[in-house]
Image (cartoon, grey):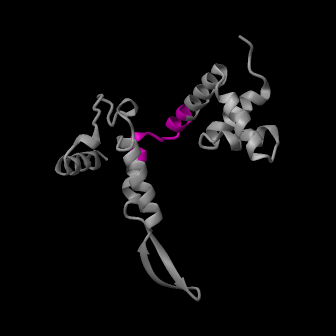
Amino acid sequence: MRELNEKMVKFCEQYVANSFNGTLAYKFVYETDNDNVAAVEANRLLKDIRIVEKIKEVEDSYRIAGHKIGINKQAIMNAIARMLNATKIIFYNGVEVRSVEDYTAINNAITTYAKLTGDFAPEEKKIKLSDDGDVKNISKLTKEEREEYKTKILAEL
C-alpha cells in the first residue's frame, strides 16, 4: 500500500484540529477557496483507508498529549459542572450593572454532558463513564434514575 504524501498527512492533522471538518481541512492544506471542490475532495480523501488510519493516529496523539497535561474524563466533568453555573457580567457605560446566567455556556455544558454520557449516541457509540467499565444507557433510565445517576457522577468529581 502506498504511503501518504505530505499534504495528505497535513489534511489528517487539520481534519482533527478543525473538529473533523473535512472542507476546512482541505481548504487549508490545499489552499483553495472553493467550498464545493473542498467538500468533494475531502469526502474522497476520507474514503481512503490510509487516511482513516492516519486520522486515528492523530486523534490518539491528541488524547495522549491531553492526558499528559491533565485533561481526562474527570477534568472534563469538573469543567462541565462549573459551566452549569456560568455567569456573565452586564456593563452599562463601562460600569458593571449586574451578573446574569450565561445561557450559552450552560447550554454547551448540558450538550457536552449529554454527549459524554450517551444521551444522543446510538447504543454502539456509548462511552464508559468510569474506569471500571460502568456503561449506562441514559435514555432508558427513568427521570429519578437519571437524577440519581447525575448526583452519583457529580459526587465522584
Residue 151, percent across and down? 23, 50
Left or right relative to 11: residue 70: left
Dominant secondary-structure state across the stretch colored magenta: helix
Looking at the picture, how far across and down is residue 47, in whole percent? 64, 25
Give the image location of residue 135, x and y in percent: 29, 33
Q: Quadrant of the N terminus?
A: top right
Count of marks, rendered view: 0
**Farthest residue toward the top?**
1
- Give x and y (percent) for residue 154: 28, 50
- Residue drawn 40% across the image and 32% down it: 125
Q: Residue at x 37, y 47 (%)?
A: 114
Q: Is residue 138 left or right of residue 41?
A: left
Q: Which residues are magenta?
A: 63-76
Residue 142 covered by magenta stretch? no
Residue lying farthest to the bottom in this orientation: 93
Of 59 and 72, which appears nearest the observer? Answer: 59
Residue 69 is left or right of residue 149, and the answer is right
Which residue is painted at 38% across and 50% down in the image? 78
Pick whichever, 122 or 54, lies toward us: 122
